[in-house]
Image (cartoon, helix red, strand yellow):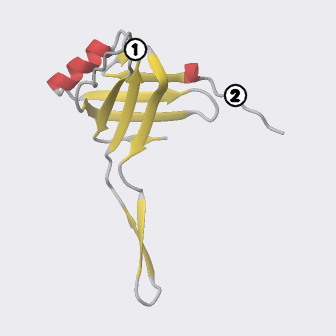
C-alpha cells in the first residue's frame, strides 16, 4: 500500500512579485478556460481532433479578511494592472502554474456579520501554463 501526505504549506502563490499569505480553507483553485483538444465525428464515423489554442484560464484565491494582502489584491483589481502569477505545489507530484500576464477581475465581496467572511479574488489569466 502506498500512502502520500498532502500539506497545504507546500503551496505558494506569488502575484505581481508579492507572496500571498493568510489563505482561508479553500486556498486556491486553478481552471483552464477550454479543453486542449476538441473532437468531431462526421456522419460516416470519420473523426477529427482539433487543437484548441485558447491560453485563457482563471485562478481563484481565497484569503482570510485579516490577510495582509487583501489591500494589495483590492488595489490590483481597482487599477487593472497586468501582473505575472505563479502557483507552485512543491509536494508530490510537483505542480506549477505560471502566467506572464493576468489581472484581478474585481475587488473581493465584503461581508460583515457575526463571523469573519472570506475574501475571494478571481484572477483572469491571459496565458496560463499548467505543468
Q: Where is residue 49 in the image (x, y as percent from the top left)?
A: 43, 70
Residue 114, placed above or below residue 96: above
Residues packed near mark 1 inside 10 Å, few (<14), some (14 to 19) or many (20 plus): few
The Cα–Cα distance between marks 2 and 1, rounded to whole angstroms, is 29 Å
Instruction: Determine whether, in the image, residue 63 is placed left or right of residue 125.
Output: right
Q: Earlier in the sequence, mark 2 or mark 1?
A: 2
Residue extending furthest toward the bottom: 44
Dot 1 lies on which element?
A: loop
Give x and y (percent) for residue 82: 22, 29
**Front in this rendered view, residue 113 or 110:** 113
Q: Tell me, for residue 116, which label it has, or none.
A: 1
Residue at position x 35%, y 39% in the image:
58
Residue 90 picture location, percent across and down: 57, 26
Q: Quadrant of the N terminus?
A: top right
Residue beneath the point at 36% across and 41% down: 128
Q: Is mark 2 on a helix, strand or loop?
A: loop
Report the number of numbered marks. 2
Asked if residue 28 lies left or right of residue 83, the reply is right
Task: Please tell me which residue is depicted at 32% across the width and 48% down the height of the picture.
Answer: 55
Q: Nearer the viewer, residue 98 or 32?
A: 32
Is the residue 56 above or below the residue 53 in the image?
A: above
Of the two numbered discs 2 and 1 in the rendering, the one whose residue sits closer to the viewer: 1
Give the x, y percent position of residue 95.
53, 35
Q: As drawn, which residue projects farthest toward the front?
A: 114
| In front of the other: 42 or 98 | 42
Query: Where is 91 relative to 114, above or below?
Result: below
Residue shown at 40%/14% (left/top)? 116
The circle on residue 12 is none
Circle 2 packing at 10 Å, graded few (<14), some (14-19), many (20+), is few
> Do the residues under discs 2 and 1 have CB atoms within 8 angstroms?
no
Residue under pointer 2: 5
Amino acid at each position: 500500500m502506498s500512502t502520500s501526505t498532502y500539506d497545504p504549506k507546500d503551496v505558494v502563490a506569488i502575484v505581481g512579485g508579492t507572496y500571498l499569505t493568510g489563505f482561508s480553507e479553500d486556498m486556491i483553485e486553478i481552471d483552464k478556460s477550454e479543453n486542449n483538444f476538441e473532437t468531431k465525428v462526421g456522419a460516416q464515423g470519420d473523426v477529427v481532433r482539433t487543437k484548441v489554442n485558447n491560453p485563457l484560464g482563471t485562478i481563484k484565491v481565497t484569503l482570510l479578511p485579516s490577510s495582509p494582502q487583501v489591500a494589495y489584491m483590492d488595489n490590483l483589481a481597482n487599477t487593472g494592472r497586468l501582473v505575472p502569477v505563479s502557483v507552485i505545489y512543491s509536494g508530490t507530484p510537483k505542480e506549477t502554474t505560471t502566467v506572464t500576464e493576468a489581472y484581478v477581475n474585481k475587488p473581493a465581496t465584503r461581508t460583515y456579520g457575526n463571523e469573519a467572511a472570506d475574501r475571494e479574488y478571481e484572477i483572469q489569466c491571459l496565458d496560463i501554463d499548467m505543468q
